[in-house]
Image (cartoon, rainbow, N blue to C red):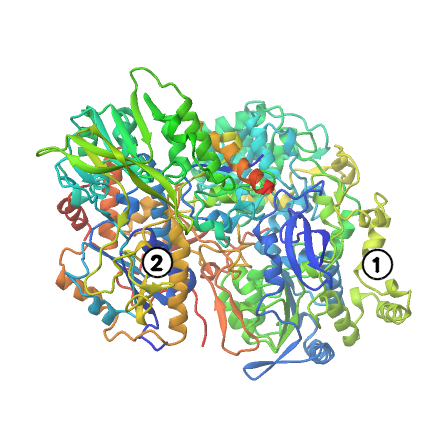
Amino acid sequence: MTYVIVGSCVNDAVCTEVCPVDCIQPAPEAGEFATTEMLYIDPDVCIDCKACADACPINAIYPAEHLPDKWTAYREINAAFFRQRMRS
Amino acid sequence: MKGDDAGALRVAIVGSGPAALYTAAELVRVGGPDVQVNMIDRLPTIGGLVRAGVAPDHADRRQVIDVYEKLARSGGRFRFHGNVEVGRHVSHAELLAHHHAVIYAIGASGSRPLDVPGANLSGCHPSSEFVGWYNGHPDHADLPVSLDCERAVVIGNGNVALDVARILLKGDDALVSSDIAAHAREALATSRIREVCVLGRRGPAQAAFTHPELLELGDLEDVSVQVDPAELASVDWRSDDFASTLRKATLETYARSRGVPNARRLLLRFMVSPIEVLGRSRVEGLRLVRNRLVNTSEGRVTAVPGERSDVLQTGLVVHAIGYRGSPPQGLPFDTASGVIPNCGGRMLDGPGGKPRAGQYVVGWIKRGPRGVIGSNKLCARETVRALMQDAAAGELPVPVRGGESFSTLIHARQPDVVSYRGWKAVDRFERQRGQGVRPREKLTRVDDMLRVARSVA
Amino acid sequence: MSKNIYTHCNYCVSLCGLEVEVDDAGEEVIEIRPDRENPFSWVDFCRKGKTAAEIRNHPQRITTPMRRVGDRYVPASYEEAIADIAQRLNRIIERDGADAVGSYHGNPLGHNFGDSNLHAGLLAAIGTGNRFWVGSLDQNSLHVVQEEMFGCELMSVPTDVDDCECFLLMGMDPAVSRFGWIEIIPGGWKRVLEARDRGADLIVVDPRVTSSSKEARTHVLIEPGEDWAFLLALIKIIVDEGWNREPEAVPVNGLDAFFELVGEADLDDLSSRCGVSVEQLRDVAERFAKARTAACVSHTGLAHSGTGTVGEWLSQLLNIITNRMDMPGGKRYERGYVDLPKAWSMMAPKSKHRSRLRNLPTVAGFHSVAELADEILTPGAGQIRAMLICSGNPVVSGPDGDRLDKALSELELLVAVDIVQRESHRHAHWLIPGTHWLEREGLHLAFGSIMEKPFAQYGNRCVKPKAGVREEWRFFVDLALKMKRPLFGFRGINGVVRLSRALAKIPGLRKFEFGPAWFEWLMVAAGRRVKLSEVKRRPHGYMYDNKRYGDLARSLRTTSKKIECAPSILMDECRRLLAAPMPKMDPEFPFCMVSRRNRESMNSWMNENARLLQQQRSNQVEMHVEDMTDLGLEDGDPVRVSSPVGSIELTVTAGTGGRRGIVTIPHGWGSRIFDVNAPGRYSRWGENRNRLVDGQRIDPLSQTPLLNMTRVRVESLEPAARQAPTRRAVGQ
């Protein structure tokens, strides 16, 4: 499965510090970080370890299969971010 | 770095919003028990714009304050001095005398003014005041807000503008479990507003809102979100920008939807600017002009007003066209950019000038009012890195006064100083008042806060 | 350019498969990623594994033997070190006897079979009975119970997770520390949650609210140290109600005698002791007994209390009397690919030695760390005068560290083998470089028999040891040779070793050199289940067979060849606990101190790694918010936590709930790491809470100090505090 960052993300980015597989982008070191609206989890790389969800200070990360109704669109939004990256 | 008896580095932080808290937490992270922090805020509460700016229906984001406050406290050497105003109770020079370093994290909590005739009419509010009003900020608790009209207009289309629109259109069942100020909730429960127009000066591709905020408008109950398809027709979307792709898709969805009859309406309008607020003693309407978009030589897109103007009838105007910092007394300030001149967080004596030893900035007063809450974290790390480099290089001035004398001074100048314990008493009081129905019910008067804070003194 | 090496992590028993990208020269690690092709383990991959190279490249890493001269350390060659150490050890042995040389080793050595085995060989050469290790601070209770019940000190029966329909988890927080302990179940917690989502029952027993307890259907808030009473109560209810079943898969002995003991217990008394209502006890008992399949799992939370051995025994019995033992969805024994008791005895040879002062037996061949300080400090025949400490930090991991530190300072000779110089090594006369698992290769011969599936993976070396660093086993062998004492106590073996080395100098005969590879080959060949070459051919790991049930019955080593359910030492101790009055709350020390795991910390090491522990660089005292309110404490206030033997200063923070009267302080913090090249310089993070733990009071069977049951008081240092708590200081 995967974890999903939802729309309340405030770019705190502690999730990127605890992720063991660097699947959360953009990372703070990336130039893109300064202008990104939120952070995204790559569903193909995520290993479901939950470190990000535990660390997020505002509970903006959910396992894909337990996304609350108001946030279900974000599963595809997270995935789409990485798809469009691959294309460009 | 020459010492102090306990060998501790003493740092004052002015402000208590996210930038201030990230900074205090970072000082613990890299400095450990060797850093003592005195955090000062004009209000008795901690939180800055996270407490007073983030919308009540986004209150889960306020938890970031709780986490970094805890981290700041975890070093055991964090003190809060609330209800203390720098420039009134204690001077900048006195802060310097008692600390190795002073960091200004005072943010940019004022509004850019609406520079059109009639902007001072009753019923036309800068967002800082309107948002402060519904968030229970003591400075704005008494704002005379009238919701006795059918249409409200929000000028600007950044996230703050959308916050205002949402709050105006959320029913009481949605707001009852939020931490909106009680007086605002009561007023909104009897609001006559059926339509909110959100006006953007430029086009859909330039609007300052972010996609999550745009998307969530569609979840408003009993509200049709409307976008004129004609305004989307000739947009030059930058196709390589992910957020743009999402934004285009969502706006097109709103443009296509036919709306629900009898629902209230939220209209997103683009390429329109106000040129006059109309009315005698109160707002009665807004004169608007259509804009066209022009590409500048630097690659920016700018709005050029056209000839045609319309009048939009309205009884409530909120302008949310950006935040603005105000210059703290006696400190250098760059009016053009609204920041204290600095280089990587080291305060300078003027734009491009020399660094002022031991003086730093962080957050919006350093970078300008841009970015989101989390943007302050890297900002804080940069400032703290500079500070620690300067400490290691022996470039921080030695405070002339000893450690404990700062508290003594503050108590003498402001007997009603609110300590960390006092703030936690207020915090707990507000949460308990929420009674499990809402996360908290805010106190909106400083006197009430002081009364609660005193109970644990 | 770069290449990928496939191996597995060796920090914890999840043994996550790794893809380690290294430079072409094989000298530096570029990146560490999980090996998604490993058929057994990789989903537990965490930041500890990801940042392993930071520890290997530790800025204070010791890369050459260092000799103490005055108050500084001076580099020396291995030859000089070995010659000096051999001579000094021999002198001490000749003067005072072999017991005058003691040893201690910790977990990282235990994770490398070859090093452990040859370390044991060295100790046998020395002939000392004063061997100590981390077991008495970790898993001794399990060794005692497994020895008594199954006839071998290591004969774990891993949880058979996927088909289990009722999990009763005690003294563990797998959401944070993964599911393994002395059972290897990679991805175990995830699979428990999946089972739960399919309808399985999940009951977590813990005095604290934890990430794991939050996922449970029922969280039992137990009084610390009373797991035995809880388990006995469950068993009593199950037996009284007739919900127990005959164990199908294993022959048992002594159940009647055990049931007699059960009959002697009073349910209300047990309920009062463990703080769980009779109603809840009944509910849990019924759910567990009636589930189609179920497993009771008990880990360090039990082991670290003064009653842990009885608790562990009763946990096994609960499984036995409900027919979960070696049954699908219960506990399943994996016979592995070597003779387990033999392999175990190579790492932990049995010893009949009794401690000089307290006359205590060994457990798994080692004495309790709680005795170490006294054995060094107390004069008399058999007093320890020299110590060899390998990959261990007993001053911080063990009780009453101040006293042990003083004892270590009085030794004639202290030799420490480690990656860096830690708190316990600060009086070392010799520092010998240690290696990191990234630099080592080998097959762990004991691990294969405590895994939940038939799996074997050869751990491949990813990078060469830092220049000049020799693997620990070489040092152990060289030392024995230099001392002219026979490795393993076998006369003539040293000659064989020398001959093999001479042979190995001939090109083409290198593999004939004596070393761990010999034992690997011999043991795997004798096990006749897999071929070592087949294992090595599969760098992603080798699932060499399918699971099967019923091997436990065939593998028991008790005289009766049955599971002994009522061993006298456990029955007697249980009766003693039943007869003892309920512990009265001491108003001077009203709180019970327990520990916890943090996700990114191995507790006693890696806390200094800034890329691992990013957010918070110290431990704190976690308290129930109502207890804090009673004491007038706010989050972040500095406090002093004291026990009868010591005190520490930390800041307090509110926990997430759970039982009142408990303070949680993670252990393993507060060790200095010294810069051997800059005398006086060190780094230190957090506080060592084991300084509060008394070395005198131990579980009588496991000999484990009361790591999770020490009583303390908490005093506010705010606003009276003049000096801040010294959680970290960089020495000048």
Residue at horizontal 26%, vertical 35%?
Answer: B307
Q: Nearer the viewer, residue C313 or B100?
A: B100
**Neighbour class for label 2 at 10 Å: few (<14), some, many (≥20)?**
many
**Which mark identifies residue B24?**
2
Check disc 2 and report its element: helix, strand or loop. helix
The reply, left or right, for residue B287 in relation to residue C36 is: left
Give the residue type at disc 1. Answer: Trp
Kindly identify the residue that appears in the image at 86 percent across and 49 percent down. Answer: C525
A3 relative position to C533: left or right = left
- Label 1 and label 2 in one chain: no
Observer able to see residue C171:
no
Q: Position of residue C612 (x, y in %)?
A: 53, 56
Disc 1 packing (10 Å; few <14; some 14–19; many ≥20):
few
Q: Are marks 1 and 2 in contact (CB under 8 Å)?
A: no
Q: Is residue B43 above or below residue C472?
A: above
Name the chain under label 2.
B
Secondary structure of the residue carrying tag 1 is helix
The N terminus of chain B lies in quadrant = bottom left
Could you say where residue B322 lies in the image, as x and y percent from the top left? Answer: 28, 45
What kind of residue is marked 2? Ala
Judge depth for marks 1 and 2 and give the one in front: 2
Of B363 and C650, which appears nearest the observer? B363
From the viewer's perspective, is residue A34 above or below residue B334? above
Toward which corner of the image does residue B380 lie, by quadrant?
bottom left
Residue C588, percent from left and from top: 34, 55
Measured as percent of width and height from the top left, residue C545 is found at 79, 37
Residue bearing mark 1: C518
Dot 1: chain letter: C
Q: Is residue C469 visible?
A: yes
Q: Residue furthest top?
A: B261
